Every structure is written in structure tokens, then in C-alpha cells.
Amino acid sequence: MTRVFNKSKETFKRKQLRNKLPHAEVVLWSKLKGKQIGCKFRRQYSVEKFVIDFVCSELKLAIEVDGDSHYTEGAKCRDSARERILESYGTAFLRFTNREIYENLNGVLIKIQQFIKRLKK
């Protein structure tokens, strides 16, 4: 069986992304790490050729933070492809914008916690 999660050939890319997290991802990570909201999240987790911002493997939950790069030409198509691939592995997907994280972090965390409760049922 071909390995699709955290392929070793993607290690360098994941490490670079972890070392250069955009500020909105730093803010969200400060609330997700250490099981603060009830489950373990990992940063910069790869599935096939895509690197996902945050993943809870236990619940098969992926969280993507949309910064400026998600609003360029072709980005919507790439984001849709990423979501379809994740969903094909049974992974649920949440997406938030930088703005949501900066202006309504508590609301973002509530949405994540509510989603987690639904997945745990």
C-alpha cells in the first residue's frame, strides 16, 4: 500500500512551513496545541501532495487557515481539490480566514469545539 500521510519526501516542506507559520496560524496553534480543546492536533500534516495547516488524526479533522495565498488566481480550485482528497480519506474539513481568527478567535474555537463534539458522537 502506498503511503499517503506525512510522506518522507514532504518532510522538508512541512518543516519549512512549521518554521514560518503566518501570524493567524500562530494564534490558532496557541489554542489548539497541548490538547487544550480536548484532542491532539498536529501542525503542517501532509496528505498526498498537500500540506494541511492543522490535523486531529484521532477524529480525522483537518483545519485550514486561509491567508492571502488562498485568494490568488487558481487558489479556489486548489483548495477544492485538497478538500476532495481529504474527504476521500474520511477526513472532515473546517476552513477559517485570517480575519476570523484575528477578529473572532473565541467564535472560531467554539465552532471547532462544536464540530469536535459532533465527530465524537
Image: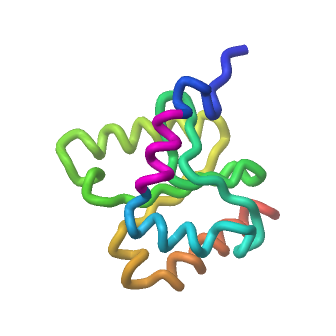
Q: Is residue 4 above or below residue 19?
A: above
Relative placement, left or right, of 36 versus 109 is: right
Q: How is the image coloured?
A: rainbow
Name the residue nearer the viewer: 102 or 117.
Answer: 102
Residue 116 at x, y percent in the picture: 70, 66
Name the residue nearer the viewer: 9 or 74.
Answer: 9
Residue at position x 32%, y 60% from top? 67
Question: Furthest-top residue in view?
Answer: 1
Q: Is residue 120 above or below residue 52?
A: below
Relative placement, left or right, of 39 versus 27 is: right
Q: Which residues are magenta?
A: 12-20
Residue 42 at x, y percent in the picture: 64, 53
Residue at position x 62%, y 34% from top? 6
Relative placement, left or right, of 37 versus 29 is: right
Position of the C terminus by quadrant: bottom right
User: Is residue 83 visible from the viewing direction of this image?
Assistant: no
Residue 18, magenta (yes or no): yes
Quarter of the view holding residue 82: top left
Residue at position x 59%, y 34% from top? 88
Q: Is residue 62 above or below residue 50?
A: below
Residue at position x 74%, y 54% from top? 59
Residue 107 at x, y percent in the picture: 51, 83
Residue 77, magenta (yes or no): no
Question: Furthest-left residue in view?
Answer: 73
Prevailing secondary structure of the magenta residues: helix
